[in-house]
Amino acid sequence: MKNIFFIRHGKLDLPYKDHSQMPSSLLNDLGKKTLDPNLDFDYISKDLSEDLSKIIPLEKIGKIYVSPFRRCRETGRFIAEFIQKNYDQKIEIEVREDLREVYFELENILANKKSADISGLNNAVLEAIYYGKNAESLDKICERLNNFFDILSNLEVNTLVISHDFLMRFIELILLNKGKIQTSDILLAGLLNTKRNVYLRGFFTDNNFLDIQNF
């Protein structure tokens, strides 16, 4: 039995502490994929050395899967270099298109809504996805995650998966559903109740998807 660790990418190289401080116009560009910023390497270096390496047994990781967006690719490369330097292990990194962030158009989602904090914005996006308005459909999200989980179920090494917060909400649901999910399995209340993942944190399970633990 192998363990799978799912984490959100590191902090973006932008003058904001996190997504909660970013203007909606910037979040809109991230959602529409018209902006693909670099990673803040000082942030990930500090967190990796002081915290993440104590949470995840990096010396036991055998493979890393990453979203195609720069912030995830750079997070994966930085962690792989850390593992090679500290544990003398070369890690294979595979870019997976099915790990890309969920598409959404925040400007249209918020067009008839009052301003909200990050929790309100997140819920508005999740509702838009659920109802299929100004965002990627549930069918497409379920299809690509089911394809990816077919691969995860046959893992031979401990694995790290690096993606994005909204996609990780659906990964959380698919784990709770034992590794396979259909649109009909998703309830809005359950989706809104998923955990918001901060930078370089997430959850882990085994390749039988029998349990999920947050960190």
Image (cartoon, rainbow, N blue to C red):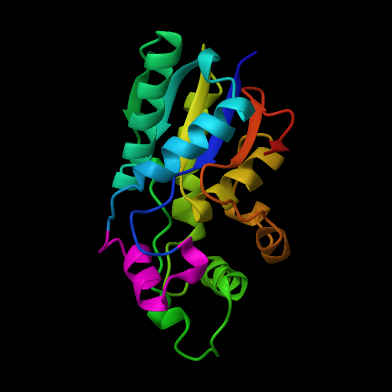
**Residue 55 location, x and y as percent?**
63, 29
Quadrant where the N terminus is found in the figure: top right
Q: Residue 140 in magenta?
A: no
Quadrant where the C terminus is found in the figure: top right
Nearer to the camera, 75 or 32: 75
Residue 57's image quarter? top right
Q: Which residues are magenta?
A: 17-35
Nearer to the camera, 138 or 115: 115
Residue 123 in the figure: left or right of residue 104: right
The residue lying at 41 percent from left, 67 percent from top is: 104
Against 190, is 134 above or below? below
Nearer to the camera, 186 or 55: 55
Residue 119's image quarter? bottom right
**Residue 29 location, x and y as percent?**
32, 68
**Residue 168 location, x and y as percent?**
55, 48
Against 120, is 66 above or below? above
Q: Is residue 69 visible?
A: no
